[in-house]
Image: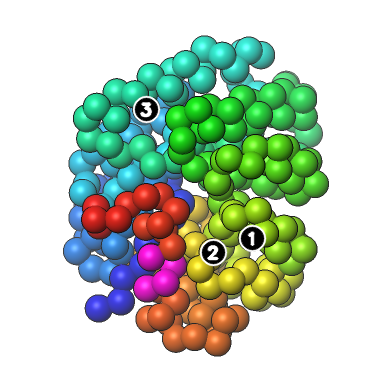
């Protein structure tokens, strides 16, 4: 049976509570059917702990921990205490279950001007991003990048960390940016948004990424692929995203599922674990 690897999901999200049996029943079903692995991604000190403890309950689930550019607005100005907390989570995990496979999601998000009464702060976002890239370099972990309307600034920053390997998740940039990322050894991950009717630009970018640098993801519970757009997303719908990428690259669905799962294993260093 064809099985997909979901390189980016948020199964700690409260939206899964609406399902009978919640996220737990869903995950048990998915792992017994068509999902070979999932990276569960945190965004702040609370969700980092949640995604990690959830990952510890499933052999095929792993975790990424980091401070999301939106979440940093609600935290203090000095990233140091949050970085120390992340580093200590990783150190403890390395002596135990070894579930943390990346720092993420981190990045820049220029979409909203306000977070409640807090103005969007580009410099604070950049500071958190740089400091987490430094942490990834020190701990030798790959990074998962969130980039929303900040393509140029992120590219300027990540290229200053040539020792760090990363992936742009739910890619929304140009064909040129995708090519630049591939050139510096990075990966590019596509979500359900590559299936949307009006997403021709995203499909053109996907076509520019060589097959050995492609990842697929849900970003669930958000970004359900066409024709489920707007509904609750989950890793069982990955085959729709995978099908679009297969068409873009002129391969079969099965081949695309296999190669993106192999790429995920390589990127997150999971050989022999799934
Ligand atoms: Zn996400």
Label total for image = 3
Mark 3: few/some/many CA within 10 Å (<14, 14-19, 20+): many
* Residue at the spot of label 1: 182
Tell me the magenta residue range: 258-262
Front position among marks 1 and 3: 1
Residue at point 49%, 62% (across, down): 215
Mark 1 and mark 2: Cα distance apart in space: 7 Å
Q: Nearer the viewer, residue 132 or 39?
A: 132
> Viewed as shown, does residue 101 lie left or right of 96?
right
* Residue at the spot of label 2: 213
**Quadrant of image for the C terminus:** bottom left
Mark number displayed over residue 90: 3
Q: Give the image location of residue 153, x and y in percent.
A: 78, 41
Q: Give the image location of residue 12, x and y in percent.
A: 37, 40
Q: Do tag 1 and tag 2 residues touch (Cβ < 8 Å)? A: yes
Judging from the image, what secondary structure is the residue with disc 3 in?
helix
Mark number displayed over residue 56: none
Residue at point 38%, 19% (across, down): 88
Provide the major secondary structure of the magenta segment: helix
Q: Nearer the viewer, residue 232 or 104?
A: 104
Mark 1: few/some/many CA within 10 Å (<14, 14-19, 20+): some
């Amino acid at each position: 049976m064809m099985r997909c690897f979901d390189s980016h999901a948020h199964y700690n999200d409260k939206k899964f509570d609406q399902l009978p049996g919640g996220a737990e029943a869903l995950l048990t079903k998915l792992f017994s059917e068509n999902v070979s692995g999932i990276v569960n991604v945190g965004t702040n000190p609370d969700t980092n702990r949640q995604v990690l403890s959830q990952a510890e309950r499933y052999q095929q689930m792993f975790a990424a921990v980091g401070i999301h550019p939106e979440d940093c607005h609600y935290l203090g100005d000095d990233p140091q205490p949050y970085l120390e907390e992340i580093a200590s989570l990783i150190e403890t995990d390395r002596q135990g279950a070894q579930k943390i496979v990346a720092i993420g999601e981190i990045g820049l998000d220029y979409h909203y001007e306000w977070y409640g009464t807090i103005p969007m702060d580009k410099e604070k976002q950049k500071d958190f991003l740089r400091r987490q890239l430094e942490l990834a370099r020190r701990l030798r972990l790959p990074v998962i990048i969130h980039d929303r309307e900040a393509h140029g600034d992120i590219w300027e920053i990540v290229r200053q960390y040539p020792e760090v390997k990363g992936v742009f998740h739910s890619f929304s940039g140009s064909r040129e940016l995708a090519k630049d990322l591939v050139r510096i050894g990075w990966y590019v991950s596509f979500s359900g948004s590559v299936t949307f009717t009006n997403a021709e630009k995203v499909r053109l970018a996907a076509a520019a990424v060589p097959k050995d640098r492609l990842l697929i993801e849900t970003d669930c519970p958000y970004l359900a692929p066409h024709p489920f757009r707007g509904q609750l997303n989950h890793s069982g719908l990955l085959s729709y995203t995978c099908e679009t990428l297969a068409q873009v690259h002129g391969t079969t669905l099965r081949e695309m599922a296999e190669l993106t799962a192999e790429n995920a294993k390589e990127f997150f260093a999971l050989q022999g674990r799934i």
